[in-house]
Image (tube, coloured by chain):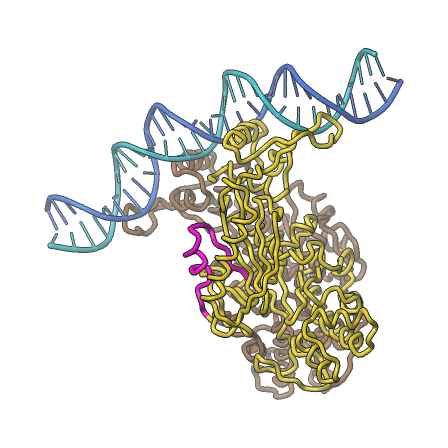
Chain colours: A brown, B yellow, C cyan, D blue
Amino acid sequence: MRGAQGDLLRLVAAGHAESRAELARLSGLAASSVSLRVEELIGSGLLVEEGAGTSRGGRRPRRLRLSPSAGLLAVADLGAHHARLGLLDLSGTPLVVEERPCEIADGPEATIDWMAAAFEDLLAAHGPPGVPLRGVGTGIPGPVDPATGRVVAPSRMPGWNNFPVAERLGAHFDLPVLVENDANLMAAGEARAWPKCETLMVLKTGSGIGCGVIVNGALHRGRGAAGDISHVRVRSDSSVTCSCGHDDCLEAYASGAALMSVLNEQGIEVRRPADVVALVEDGVPEATALVRNAGRLIGEVLTVLVNFINPDAIVVGGSLSPAEPLIASIRAAVYERCLPLATRDLEISTTRSGPDAALLGAGSLLLDAVLA
Amino acid sequence: MRGAQGDLLRLVAAGHAESRAELARLSGLAASSVSLRVEELIGSGLLVEEGAGTSRGGRRPRRLRLSPSAGLLAVADLGAHHARLGLLDLSGTPLVVEERPCEIADGPEATIDWMAAAFEDLLAAHGPPGVPLRGVGTGIPGPVDPATGRVVAPSRMPGWNNFPVAERLGAHFDLPVLVENDANLMAAGEARAWPKCETLMVLKTGSGIGCGVIVNGALHRGRGAAGDISHVRVRSDSSVTCSCGHDDCLEAYASGAALMSVLNEQGIEVRRPADVVALVEDGVPEATALVRNAGRLIGEVLTVLVNFINPDAIVVGGSLSPAEPLIASIRAAVYERCLPLATRDLEISTTRSGPDAALLGAGSLLLDAVLA
DNA sequence: CCATCTTCCTTCGAAATCGAAGTTATGGCG
DNA sequence: CGCCATAACTTCGATTTCGAAGGAAGATGG
């Protein structure tokens, strides 16, 4: 989709504009030019007119939407032991989302080929006939070089180091391919749910601790590892050596994996981060204390970052995030230690996009590639 | 300067483009359109053609420069006891820079009116006749709300809280006015000297510790306090209460003011941060040890931020920056503790723009306002 | 020193975009 | 109910921008 038409489509797809008038305001084009292009887009079946919107004091706008038959995106979010997979229409609305078991330790070739097959599967079962697939994307639980689409020095993905994921995935589909870190995808997904926030920190709390950063409305990738907070040194009495080789990393104290190992040592059996949340909800004091301490440690780290980048909101997601004491103690630490200027109007809350945040984020980022 | 012409002027003024061909590449306009607009700009006296550039394998480009008579910018950088003042042409080249004594504690009205008089002074003495003043700007050693141009909750500027600096300065000159935090200006100035770096952290070490952040080539302001690192809690044995009310802030250990007060207690008299640098250069062990410790503490804080935003470079400026051990121990801490992915290709070095960095930054930011 | 390749820049008709002046639809208000 | 203010589009001639072709100037390499 070239030039001006692509711009207009993207504005509609991203949910920023719903009428010709809004398109004119946001795109900077003249209203007359917008009308012309929109007419063409409707003619070629990519946009549809759908009833009237609400008046803002004058004539009601004619609502524009992406045609459901404009195309589909196939997206995935890889975890250690399972993957979420979904089909989205071009405006990012999920047609279907499934969770399937999948061992990332099986290595990149097997996993990616499995994913490609799963996509075909979903398409056959849920793809409306005649609607073309327009892009594929996946989240990876490790650092990804955005330029090459390769995994770089992942800590929990044996055999994946430097593997060209985008290339392998692209071999199955001759389409735009997106490969991105999972926390970054989550951040991109949340960003759509926080349209008024220009700067956003999105925390993914699960087995590990990840963080995605939105600066000025766009995902900040840095050199590919931006957002890492798991290897920050925390103030602590004891001394634990992290897998990265340094002492007292946040991850060694506050990650789901760390919490689970402490609980298991205490004879309380847990297998997944969600089990910890369940324990907390059941009022098991050992679990609650641990989670509260984790929140405090995370909050103290966030303190530095909040003073530094002044986000408009901090969003906490991931499988540990439903545990109330976690977010409560994060809040407490941040509000206590940060500068008033930085915490005034700072919102700290749980995910608005829910468990599909990463899939939605993949859709959002893919859209730019598809309509470029 | 409206529309396309403004874009082209800005590209030339900012030093990004030097020929019609470069303008075409960077602006996205067609080469033919660029030629047309450039001809107009030359006709109206804003651009001049100046000899030929170096060939890149074909015909040599005809170099374009902003006409020296296109306009002037008057810029200042306020410190606690003195101000740097300068006149720049629109391409940011200084015509004259002076340092004059000036007590910020005299309050905002007196200081700003004094500044306006000083600008008139400089214009009369060094402004080429017939060249119009096109904008004024100043740096402030405290937080500034970018939207309103007001000072917000400064710690060392009695009487300035919430004062509308931009408004008062604008009353003297009916022109675009820029009011910005001094570390932010320094960052904007350095950014021009590091054209290949998209993400930059610029540290201002003086009586206090400031930091400006460039993300994606643009100054990141956040809510007006972005870049603050002075009130981060540091790991420490003793316990010192900072002016902000919390314990063990970085500023209370590693700022020039903190170093000076320790030295003075030890009977070594110092009055300005530069005196500390002199002591270090003279090999006074007490001073060297202090500076080294300050560098380590700063470096440990930077560690967190480097992992988080993955800058391309960290630039250390300010009156303490010439002290070799400072930057050496910052380097040591950062390289030791950060993730390899974040430090690979990370450059940590002293200012490229020198003492005028803030003035150059003011020019750079003002340009956008003037040629908007 | 001559052919060839690059790069820079201009020319000119075609195409896209603008913007001022309409047209259509709606809410509010006496 | 009729008038007015407001907003959402349309129409259409004027303007800007594009892009393909070509000329100008210099590098390269025999």
Residue D22: image quadrant is: top right
| B326 relative to A93 in the view: left or right | right
Visible in this render: residue A82? Answer: no
Q: Residue at x 54, y 58 (%)?
A: B138
Q: Nearer the viewer, residue A228 or A169?
A: A228
Q: Residue at x 55, y 42 (%)?
A: B128
Horizontal and vertical percent position of residue B16: 63, 42
The residues colored magenta run B162-181
Horizontal and vertical percent position of residue B344: 78, 58
Total numbered labels placed on residues in the image:
0
Horizontal and vertical percent position of residue A19: 39, 45
Magenta highlight on residue B173: yes
Magenta highlight on residue A366: no
User: Is residue A155 placed above or below A268 in the rendered structure?
Assistant: above
Q: Residue at x 64, y 58 (%)?
A: A77
Q: Nearer the viewer, residue A244 or A309?
A: A309
| A17 relative to D8 in the view: left or right | right
Horizontal and vertical percent position of residue A185: 61, 58
Visible in this render: residue A305? Answer: yes
Q: Nearer the viewer, residue B2 or A355?
A: B2
User: Is residue A281 placed above or below A353 in the rendered structure?
Assistant: below
Q: Nearer the viewer, residue A303 or B259?
A: B259
